Amino acid sequence: MNGIAQPWWKSAVIYQVYPRSFMDANGDGMGDLPGVISKLDYLAGLGIDAIWLSPVFRSPQDDNGYDVSDYQDIDPLFGTLEDMDRLIAEAKKRGIRIILDMVLNHSSDEHRWFIEAKKSRDNPYHDFYVWRDGEAGTPPNDMPASFGGPAWEWVPELKQYYFHQYSVKQPDLNWENPAMRQELYKILHWWAARGVGGFRLDVVDHFGKDPDQKIRVAGPRLHEYIRELSREALQGAELVTVGEAWSATTDSAKLYSNPDGSELSMVFQFEHIKLDRVPGRENRELMPLPFLQFKEVLSRWQTELYEKGWNSLFWENHDLPRCVSRWGDDGEYRETCAKMLAILLFGMQGTPYIYQGQELGMTNVDYALDDYRDIGALNHIREMRAEGYSEAEILHSLHTVSRDNARTPMQWSTEENAGFTKGKPWLRVNPNYRTINAEAQVNDPDSVYACYRALISLRKKYPVFADGRYALLLPEHKELFAYTRTNAEEELLVVCNFYGHTLQNPLDAETSDMRLLISDYPDCRETLRPYEARIYYRTRTGRK
Ligand code: GLC
């Protein structure tokens, strides 16, 4: 790669752990840090380089930890600070870094800053949050909060409203206040000194909000704030930083992930994730994926960011449904489809992320209404009931889009509760754990897990995965997603049949002098079978 040393995260694969659903070591039904430690060998076996750990800080758990009441302590649900130190050290022994999920747009209303802020208008912490004067019953404007209701909450003692873009227990921090920002930087330094490998910045594009202009995301001072944060809190250490930015465009991503290091390493962008959302019913239903647009969007990100930024590659996280259920087949072809989606993603340029269970091909869950736990789902049920929807309609909606689809306990084995806990799991396990589980897959060379492991090792072996220039092939083909990656020495050809029909392979001739690196079928035929995916390789001097 031009002989210049590249940061470690450009050739890394990152695995997201949602701790409450990963592994429970103490039998209280809730995953915890000792549970994560007990599974490090499993993760090292997969070959990952870092773990993004969803929040484990002290929290009243109104939004499963995305409401932090102390950024410098661990919630007793998950363990202790000593457990965290042990996790960092044990992971390090296995070559794995720990990336913490920092929720810096808002805190919990139980954070001591907010408790102080509410005491009086001249309390030094008052200005750590976003307040507006007003009268009871007449909020400053009609901005809604993400989990339902208005974004303004009245505090009668102060005769003021505070602003909260998420739940009423998640007051927005005031990024316009330099003293507040300095406190956040101290926290980041403190964790960096404890040895973490980086940070995921929750809803980073909300930092520059301007409620008077009704601006939630991508506000006028956003990049100024990020540059300051980067300069004052992230320099020196080899930290990876990834911002969550639903509003990111390829243009803003070039700022966020500027190769000069002035902002972050990369952002999670959601343009491809938004394509099957129904306008006006974003959190209610999904429509069939507009496939040509899907190819266009992902390809545009690949070409636009080439040498000008850096992509994060993902299909899943703790907020999204499972990709096999969403875009593919979670029945007859579940395994092949899961492998195809893996191959499609891992062939691209950027840092791939695997969400826990994705490497097993875990699926959405068929819950009853009272099985749901997510604040988003509970709100969704309340709203749809009030709007007169039937139980069946509400269930259908939740089965398709609920965040709890991704939060079902990790499926380790055929033991009771999927081997996740000896107690009563906080969220019901998906009954399909009897067939879909890690124990059955780790030693099976044909498993989805084995496919992910092979992809990770291929990415380590061939530099073209990290630095090759991307070109989309057959942009108008309605069922095939095919592209090449090319650097000075090597070339990859990735061919994926995205659907369940057998197709003629229009690229057959191209591959005659190429070597097959990986495929999701045991043999190669002229046709491409349902969800068949292949990566071919050649050196540009003609050696296979
Ligand atoms: C992010 C998190 C999500 C959380 C929200 C508020 O989108 O991924 O889980 O509810 O921010 O912090």
Image (cartoon, helix red, strand yellow):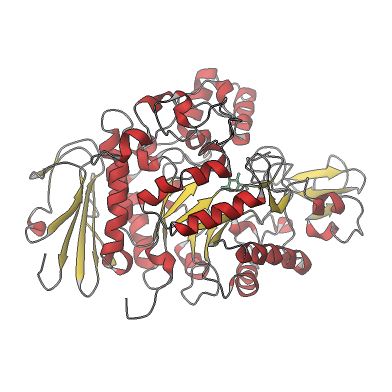
Residue 520 seen in this snapshot: yes
Task: Say if 231 sits above or below 102 in the image.
Answer: below
Q: Is residue 76 left or right of residue 8?
A: right
Q: Between 379 and 169, which is closer to the camera in this rendering?
A: 169
Q: Between 51 and 69, which is closer to the camera in this rendering?
A: 51
Task: Say if 37 sits above or below 461 in the image.
Answer: above
Q: Position of residue 525 (x, y in %)?
A: 8, 43
Seen at 34% across and 27% down, the residue is 435
Seen at 36% across and 31% down, the residue is 436
Q: Position of residue 42 (x, y in %)?
A: 40, 45
Residue 96 seen in this snapshot: no
Q: In this view, does 54 lie to the left or right of 164?
A: left
State the image quarter where residue 459 is shown. bottom left
Q: In this view, does 169 lie to the left or right of 240?
A: right
Number of numbered discs overlaid on the protein picture: 0
Q: Position of residue 38 (x, y in %)?
A: 49, 43
Q: Position of residue 488 (x, y in %)?
A: 22, 75
Which quadrant is home to the C terminus? bottom left
Seen at 31% across and 49% down, the residue is 453
Q: Between 193 and 428, which is closer to the camera in this rendering?
A: 193
Which quadrant is home to the N terminus? bottom left
State the image quarter where residue 122 is shown. bottom right
